[in-house]
Amino acid sequence: MAACQMDGGGLQPLNQGPPPPSVSDNVHEAVDGLVVGHRLMAAGEYELALRAYYRAAAEQGMNADVLSAIGSANLKLGRLNQAELILRRALELDPTNVPAMNNLGVVLMGQGKYSEARLVFRNAYGLDSGQSDEIRENLKLAIAKSENSAYDPAQQSNNTSLVRRGNGRYLLLSTPK
């Protein structure tokens, strides 16, 4: 055998080197999946963020924050039905989760459910004590869309865009034609 040499009747590998470090040497705490996911979302890596959020779910359980994050990633990936179900579940666990509530409103707007989105944004704005400009702008847009009876989605182009504002919150922007 070319890679081994005979030594006292037994085979020994050549260039053995030092033994591998023990498990206790240089062990670092794993970074929280939510933190990793939030960073990936900020970088526009939504699929990778979703994987990180699932890892967080395995580590922490499916709590409201993890569900809200998973719903937000699905929202960015355009999976509105999945996002809606997950965000509603997050709100069942924590009815005061303002980012989940805002993101649910964004999902509902994307589905054309303007009246329900208006109610969700109004609740989020109230829970946030009116401190979020993003939620206020989302509420204004939902009010305008729900009151505009002449609005026909078939004749209108999608003139809205989604902007991340941090902490899992998104702003729905309407651009003029």
Image (cartoon, rainbow, N blue to C red):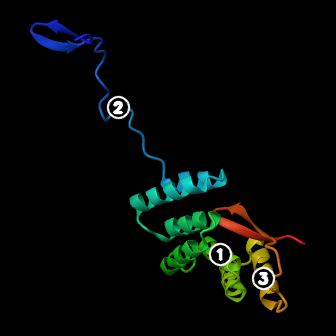
In front here: 3 or 20? Answer: 3
Within the image, what quadrant is residue 158 found in? bottom right
**Are there few (<14), some (14-19), or many (20+) residues within 10 Å of tag 2?**
few
Q: Which residue is mark 2?
A: 25
Which one is earlier in the sequence, the residue at label 2 or at label 1? 2
Give the label on residue 107, or none.
Answer: 1
What element does badge 1 sit on?
helix
Give the label on residue 119, or none.
Answer: none
Within the image, what quadrant is residue 6 found in? top left
Q: Is residue 8 above or below residue 148?
A: above
Instruction: Single out the residue that lies furthest toward the left.
Output: 9
Q: CA distance from mark 2 to mark 1?
A: 47 Å
Q: What's the residue type where badge 1 is placed?
A: Val
**Are there few (<14), some (14-19), or many (20+) residues within 10 Å of tag 1?**
many
- Cβ–Cβ below 8 Å for labels 2 and 1? no
Which one is earlier in the sequence, the residue at label 3 or at label 1? 1
Which one is earlier in the sequence, the residue at label 2 or at label 3? 2
Which label lies toward us, 2 or 1?
Answer: 1
Name the quadrant of the N terminus: top left
- Where residue 94 sits: x, y (%)? 52, 77
Which label lies toward us, 2 or 3?
Answer: 3
- Is residue 53 shown left or right of residue 99? left
What element does badge 2 sit on?
loop
What element does badge 3 sit on?
loop
- Residue drawn at x 31%, y 35% is 23
Name the quadrant of the C terminus: bottom right
- Residue drawn at x 71%, y 82% is 112
- Is residue 152 shown left or right of residue 101? right
Which label lies toward us, 3 or 1?
Answer: 3
Q: Which residue is mark 3?
A: 153
